[in-house]
Amino acid sequence: MRIFLDANVYFSAARSPQGGSSTVCELIKVKKLVLYTTRDVLHEAERNIRQKEPISTRLRFYELMTTLNAKIVAVGKQNAQLRFAKIINKKDTHVLEGARVSKADFLVTLDKKHFQNEKVKQTNLPFAIVSPGELLKKLSKS
């Protein structure tokens, strides 16, 4: 199973070791799921952690990056915007493109407003967009 995490999931996992995002990260390690990301997603997560959280959260983020061993895929921002700008905020197109390029089964995000609106839902994307909780439910059934 291929998983692509949005920056907010990394942020949440680093911030709250007991939360759903952390549990997803632990299951990725235990079940040996294949995790994909992009440099932009990791930079966004790190930038937000640096701006909003104490050093302990940043250290946990770095630890997660080391242990999760995510495969980094390259994403062209122009291609992402051309492909997805009509269905999602321009600043989020690279996330959809990263999930598409990595051939992810699931894009995991906490951003329901931008990623689970009607335009996105009506688009025939080759991956499911789920919250950490929804992914945990799906993984517990398999």
Image: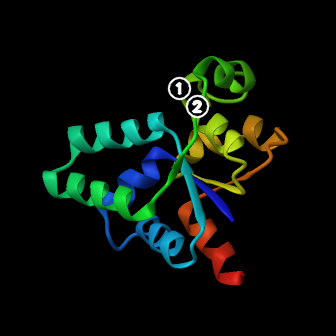
Rendering coords of residue 85 (x, y %):
68, 22
Left or right: 91 as drawn, with respect to 102? left
Q: Residue at x 68, y 21 (%)?
A: 79
Q: In the displayed orientation, state which residue is furthest to the bottom.
A: 141
Inter-mark Cα distance, 1 to 2: 7 Å
User: Which residue is more in the foreground, 139 or 113?
Assistant: 139
Label 2, on which residue?
94
* Above-or-below relation of 88 to 121: above
Question: Which residue in the structure is indicated by mark 1?
Answer: 91
Mark 2 residue element: helix
Report helix, strand or loop for mark 1: helix
Kind of residue at disc 2: His
Picture quarter with the C terminus: bottom right
Residue 122 location (% of width, % of height) = 83, 40
Choose mark 1 or mark 2, whichever is in front: 2
**Quadrant (top left, top right, bottom left, bottom right) of the N terminus:** bottom right
Residue shown at 66%/59% (left/top)? 2
Q: Amino acid at mark 1?
A: Lys
On residue 72, the disc is none
Which image quadrant for residue 131? bottom right
Classify residue 137 by image quadrant: bottom right
Instruction: Relative to 18, say whether 86 is above or below.
Output: above
Marks 1 & 2, CB-CB < 8 Å contact: yes
